[in-house]
Image (tube, rainbow, N blue to C red):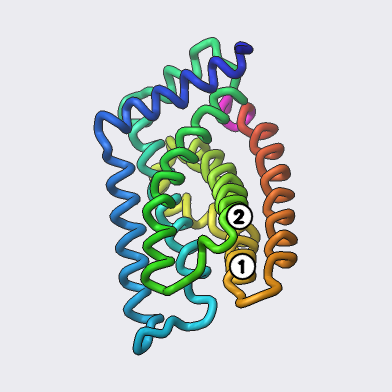
């Protein structure tokens, strides 16, 4: 294992161990996502029939909202414990620090999605599991793109007083293309037939966003955190 991979694993493992002991972020984001799905289900399901494409939109809105909550709480915990300051003065490269924090956020969101996706499929009678590989690809690529930008912004704002307000203000406009691609790709998969080519096109677009966002985040994380 290289020094970079070892540093990433140590940071991700540290975040996961803290979360396993407290379960604060996991339970908070999971209950928030479940509440979003339940509330929307009352508004977009009439006489047992959901509004067209509502499942795709509500799935990604729930992921985006719970992701923002997870990012805010994760870095607030780092600020309160002065852990981020300790990591910054440790002999660890900034890119490894960024990728390690990103890995912890992705694992938390994957746990939330493991509960939210079946619930959306049930509440909206959506065939989200008819194409499991494409659905997994859309969820993975969309979550990586959203968390890549969110981790950078959450780290930038960790010392700001208005960080709870500024994080969604900065994050949502930048990640709108990711959310739109996720919604349209999922909606294409839910079509009765012939939606797979369109879903693959949206998946390729999400992969492109991931490459761009992660490259820019790795490029800007070090100067941002140094200042």
Residue 190 appearing in the image: yes
Magenta stretch encompasses residue 226: yes
Q: Main secondary structure of the magenta part?
A: helix
At 53% across and 43% down in the image, what residue appears?
153
Q: Which quadrant holds residue 91?
A: top right
Q: Check whether the beta carbons of the residues at disc 2 and disc 1 lie within 8 A of each other.
A: yes
Residue 138, label in figure: 2
Q: Position of residue 17 (x, y in %)?
A: 34, 25
Considering every residue shown, the one lying at the far left of the view is 22
Mark positioned earlier in the residue sequence (2 or 1): 2
**Magenta part of the chain:** 223-227
Q: Which quadrant holds residue 159?
A: top left
| Disc 1 element | helix
Q: Position of residue 225 (x, y in %)?
A: 56, 28
At 49% across and 40% down in the image, what residue appears?
106
Of residue 97 and residue 198, the one placed in the foreground of this image is 198
Report the residue marked by disc 1: 189
Q: Vertical placement of 6 versus 226: above or below? A: above
């Amino acid at each position: 294992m290289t020094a970079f991979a070892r540093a990433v694993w140590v940071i991700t493992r540290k975040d996961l161990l803290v979360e396993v002991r407290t379960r604060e972020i996991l339970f908070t984001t999971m209950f928030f996502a479940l509440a979003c799905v339940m509330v929307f289900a009352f508004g977009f399901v009439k006489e047992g029939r959901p509004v067209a494409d509502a499942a795709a939109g509500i799935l990604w809105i729930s992921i985006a909202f719970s992701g923002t909550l997870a990012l805010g709480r994760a870095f607030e915990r780092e600020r309160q414990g002065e852990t981020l300051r300790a990591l910054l003065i440790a002999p660890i490269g900034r890119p490894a620090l960024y990728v390690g924090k990103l890995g912890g956020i992705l694992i938390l969101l994957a746990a939330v999605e493991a509960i939210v996706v079946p619930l959306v499929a049930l509440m909206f009678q959506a065939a989200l599991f008819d194409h499991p590989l494409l659905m997994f690809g859309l969820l993975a690529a969309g979550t990586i793109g959203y968390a890549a930008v969110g981790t950078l912004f959450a780290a930038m704002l960790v010392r700001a007083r208005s960080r709870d307000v500024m994080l969604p203000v900065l994050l949502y406009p930048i990640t709108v293309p990711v959310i739109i691609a996720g919604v349209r790709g999922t909606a294409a998969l839910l079509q009765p037939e012939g939606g797979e080519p369109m879903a693959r096109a949206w998946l390729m677009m999400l992969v492109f966003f991931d490459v761009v966002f992660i490259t820019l985040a790795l490029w800007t994380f070090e100067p941002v955190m140094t200042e």
